[in-house]
Structure formats: C-alpha cells, structure tokens
C-alpha cells in the first residue's frame, strides 16, 4: 500500500481538534515511523532521573492511579470507545486474536501499558519499540462504510490520529474510574497527570505538538470526538464487542453488573450503537454494584488491591532482584507472565 507523502503529513498538525473531528475525510494520514518514535522517546531517556524507577516513578500521579486494581472496572469502557473508531474496529477484526483469545488480549494490553508505566527505563523504551513494530504490520481498508468513512478507506495502526484516540481513551478511563472511587484529583494533580500522560503518548510515537496543550484542551478534544461522526459503531465493532463480552472468562460468563456499569460509563449514542441493554433493571443493578464496590474496595489489603506490576516496581526500587511468589502470581493474573518486560 502506498505510504502517505511526508510533506503532506504535516498538514494534520495545522488543524484544530474540532476540525479534525468534523472533517475526517480531508485529513491526510500522518504515520509514525521508527525514526519518529526514536525522536519522541530519546528525550524521555535523557530526562529520567533513575533507570530503575522508570519514566514516571513512585511520586507520579500515573503510578498512584494505575496501581489500583479497580482500574479494570473501566476496561470495557475503554475497549468500546476504541472500537467505536472504525479504523480500530477494522484493525482488531482483521488482525487481532482478540476474538479467539479475549484473555490473551487483556493480558497483552495490560502488559504493554504496565511495562511502560511501571517498568525500568530500558523496559519501557523496549516495549515502545515492540509495540511500534507490531503496529507497523497492521494496515488495510475498511470492508464497509462506517460513519463518514466509505468502504475501502485505508487505515494504519501507526497513524497518529488512531494512536491519539487509543491514548485518550486509556488516560481518560483510568482517571474516570479513579475519581469515581476516590474523589476528584486536585487541580495540581490533574495538571501533573496530564503532563505525565504526554510522556506515555511519546511512547506511542505521538508528537507533543499533536496533543492538546493542557487538561482543558484534552477534555475539549475528547468531548469533540465523542460528539463527532468519526465515532460510529460499525458492523465490525459490534461483532467484535459482542464476541469479546460473550466469551467466558475462566469458565465464567461476564457478570451482568459489569456490563451494566460499562453501559453506564458510555455516551448514550454509543451505548445504543453497541446494543447494550440499559433499562430500569440494568440501571438499578449498576447503581447497587457501585455502592458495594465503593464500600468494599478501600478495605481490600494493598497487597491485593495494588496490581502486580506496581508491586514488582516497588520491590525493584527496594533492591530486590526478583519479585516474590505472590507478586509473580498477581503478574500472571494481570499480564499473563510472572515479570514485566518478558
């Protein structure tokens, strides 16, 4: 497939977020090359104060948010928001093993994110390169029209716009669930969280000038995307979501209350597009689930509440050469392997 011309690629950077959302067919793709990625991540290595603490470290807001196991409560929301972008849905349907192995997709996604967040500097940068190489193999065309995109429209996983949307859904969902459980962040912490999220974006290869200036701009761009015709539940998105949510997890079906909460966290038009039931019974079930979770979760011991990769990072900073048996078990639950970076 012919690659977009690099001189035309720069045109996207001159458009505002609302213009990008409202004129998707006029957007010229801007692909992240391996050289682009190296330019984005080189400053991260230079700025890191401790190779073992990684790119964020124990004082970061990202560590405080991502260490909480309750973040999984928003996994369904993040997945469906991503699938609502026709490019992402087409790529997952054509290139991902998610339909045959939903647990594997869960493990792969969290392994990537947790290695970037909690890994050493070398582990985080290596994961960024591995993810880029994987994305470089994912390209194709939409099999059918979806929203503003006609059938045959090309997509690339390493397109900056697609990467930016995935990044936005991850950062916004993690913060949404954290604030739901622990209350709103202070203005200072929110500003720090957004600054840190830009470092994570660099690991995806997203240039800083392709991101909003601050959290206010981020929120405005997110709102514009949620209201834009770009997000459309295509046939591929609906099929992928139905199969993933119907797949048994450890021989058990997805609990109804989890589906109800996922519906609660979605904009109504996307909730309807995915065909999620959200009648009076579902709303009551979601409300009861939130009451119980808010009451019980803070009482869970930190050794269970905090995800294995975070505990591995804490042990690493304490000078322990390898995570203990309990942390290795938690890692297998969260990332499908005993240690980060494997």
Image (cartoon, grey):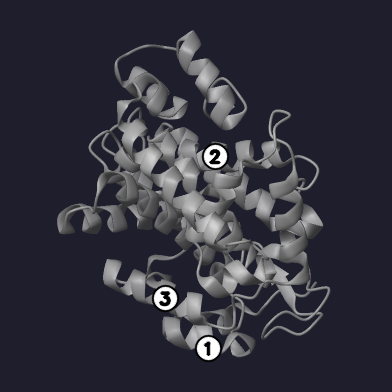
Q: Give me the C-alpha separation between circle 2 and circle 3.
A: 25 Å
Residue 195 visible in the shown view:
yes
Q: Name the residue beneath numbered marker 1.
A: 22
SS at mark 1 in the image:
helix
Q: Where 127 sits versus 271, above or below?
A: above
Q: Nearer the viewer, residue 9 or 135?
A: 135
How far across and down, in percent of the image, does residue 61 sit? 27, 44
The picture places residue 101, in percent across and down from the top left corner, at: 76, 39
Q: To which quarter of the image does residue 208 belong?
A: bottom left
As measured in the structure, the alpha-carbon distance from the residue carrying label 1 to the one carrying label 3 is: 12 Å
Give me the residue at 73% from left, 64% from top. 238
Q: Which mark is residue 110?
A: 2
Q: Are marks 2 and 3 in contact (CB under 8 Å)?
A: no
Q: Quadrant of the C terminus?
A: top right
Q: Earlier in the sequence, mark 1 or mark 2?
A: 1
* Foreground pick, 318 / 180: 180
Location of residue 293 (image quadrant): top left
Of residues 177 and 328, the one nearer the viewer is: 177
The residue tagged with tag 3: helix, strand or loop? helix
Query: For this view, does 125 lie left or right of residue 107?
Result: left
Q: Residue furthest front?
A: 281
Where is 158 relative to 325, above or below? Answer: below
Closer to the N terminus: mark 1 or mark 3?
1
For numbered disc 2, what is the local secondary structure? helix
Identify residue for label 3: 223
How far apart in space, not on screen, are marks 1 and 2 (Cα)?
Answer: 32 Å
- Residue 255, quarter of the rendered image: top right
Seen at 53% across and 61% down, the residue is 280
Q: Residue at x 65, y 71 (%)?
A: 273
Q: Is residue 153 above or below residue 293?
A: below
Q: Residues within 10 Å of mark 3 (few under 14, many from 20)?
A: few
């Amino acid at each position: 497939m012919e690659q977009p011309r690099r001189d035309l690629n720069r045109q996207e950077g001159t458009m505002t977020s609302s213009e990008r959302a409202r004129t998707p067919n006029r957007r010229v793709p801007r692909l992240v090359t391996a050289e682009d990625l190296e330019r984005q991540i080189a400053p991260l290595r230079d700025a890191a104060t401790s190779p073992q603490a990684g790119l964020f470290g124990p004082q970061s807001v990202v560590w405080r948010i991502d260490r909480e196991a309750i973040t999984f409560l928003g996994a369904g929301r993040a997945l469906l928001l991503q699938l609502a972008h026709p490019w992402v849905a087409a790529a997952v349907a054509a290139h991902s093993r998610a339909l045959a192995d939903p647990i594997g997709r869960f493990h792969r996604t969290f392994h990537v994110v947790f290695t970037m967040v909690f890994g050493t500097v070398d582990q985080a940068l290596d994961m960024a390169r591995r993810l880029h190489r994987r994305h470089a193999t994912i390209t194709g065309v939409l099999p059918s029209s979806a929203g503003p995109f006609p059938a045959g429209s090309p997509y690339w996983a390493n397109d900056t716009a697609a990467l930016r949307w995935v990044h936005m859904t991850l950062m916004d969902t993690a913060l949404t669930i954290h604030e739901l459980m622990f209350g709103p962040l202070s203005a200072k912490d929110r500003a720090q969280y957004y600054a840190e999220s830009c470092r994570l974006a660099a690991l995806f290869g997203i240039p800083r000038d392709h991101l909003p200036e601050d959290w206010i701009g981020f929120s405005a761009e997110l709102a514009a995307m949620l209201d834009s015709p770009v997000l459309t539940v295509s046939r591929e998105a609906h099929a992928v979501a139905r199969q993933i949510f119907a797949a048994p997890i450890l021989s058990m079906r997805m609990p109804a209350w989890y589906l109800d909460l996922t519906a609660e966290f979605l904009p109504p038009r996307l909730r309807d597009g995915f065909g999620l039931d959200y009648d009076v019974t579902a709303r009551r079930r979601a409300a009861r689930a939130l009451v119980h979770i808010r009451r019980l979760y803070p009482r869970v011991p930190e050794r269970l509440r905090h995800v294995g990769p975070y505990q591995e990072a804490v042990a690493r900073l304490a000078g322990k050469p390898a995570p203990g048996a309990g942390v290795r078990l938690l890692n297998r639950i969260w990332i499908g392997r005993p240690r980060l970076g494997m």
